[in-house]
Image (cartoon, rainbow, N blue to C red):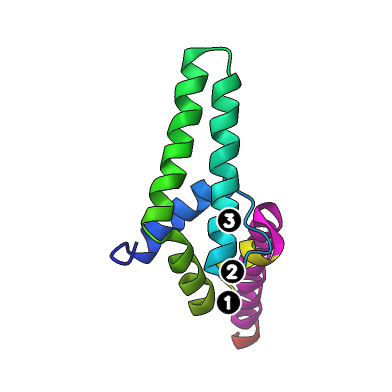
Amino acid sequence: MDSVPSYEFHKIFRRVSVNVNLKGAFTPEEIDEKLERAQKKFQIKAKRAATEAKKKRLYKKAKAIEILQDKNFSEKTIAEAISNRYGIVNLTLHYGREKAEEMKLAFERARIRRRGIRRRRRK
C-alpha cells in the first residue's frame, strides 16, 4: 500500500468502508481486527449461501479483505487520517461512513458559499 497514490487509496477505502464499519478504529491493530471480523463474516455467509454465484461473490469479498490486510491497509489508513484531518478517511474513522459523507458535502457547500460571498463583496 506504500506505493499506492492517495487518489487510488481513497477509491479503495470507500469500497472497503461500505462493507466494513471502521468507526472508532484509531490504531492499525483495531482496523485489522475489524477487517478480520468482516472477513470471517463473509466466509460464514458464503458457507450458508444458497446459490453458487452468491457464494463466489462473498468469498471474493473475504479474499479481497485478506489481501488488504497483507498489504498494510490499516497503516496507510492511519497515515491518511493524520495527514488530512478534514478528509473522508479521518471523518469515517470518527463518525462512520454515512455521517462522514454528509459532513464532507456540507464542508464543500460551505466553501462554495463563502466563495460566492467574497465575489459579491468585491463588486
- Residue drawn at (56%, 39%) of the image: 40
- Measure the alpha-carbon separation of dots 3 and 1: 23 Å
Q: Amino acid at mark 2?
A: Asn
- Residue 52 lies, in percent from the top left, at 47, 14
Question: Does residue 43 sit above or below 4 in this rendering?
Answer: above
- Measure the alpha-carbon separation of dots 3 and 2: 18 Å
Give the main secondary structure of the magenta stretch: helix
Q: Is residue 88 visible?
A: no
In terms of sequence position, does the residue under pointer 3 or pointer 2 come before the other? Answer: 3
Name the residue carrying label 2. 90
In terms of sequence position, does the residue under pointer 2 or pointer 1 come before the other? Answer: 1
Q: Which residues are magenta?
A: 95-120
- The reply to whether callout 2 and callout 1 are in contact (CB within 8 Å) is yes
- Residue 85 lies, in percent from the top left, at 58, 77
- Residue 92 lies, in percent from the top left, at 62, 61
- Residue drawn at (44%, 23%) of the image: 56
Q: Residue furthest left?
A: 3
- Residue drawn at (60%, 87%) of the image: 122
Q: Is residue 72 magenta?
A: no
Q: Residues within 10 Å of mark 3 (few under 14, many from 20)?
A: some
Q: Is residue 123 visible?
A: yes
Q: Which mark is residue 33?
A: 3
- Which quadrant would the N terminus be assigned to in this image? bottom left
Q: Residues within 10 Å of mark 1 (few under 14, many from 20)?
A: few
Q: Amino acid at mark 3?
A: Glu
Name the residue carrying label 1. 85
Q: Is residue 101 magenta?
A: yes
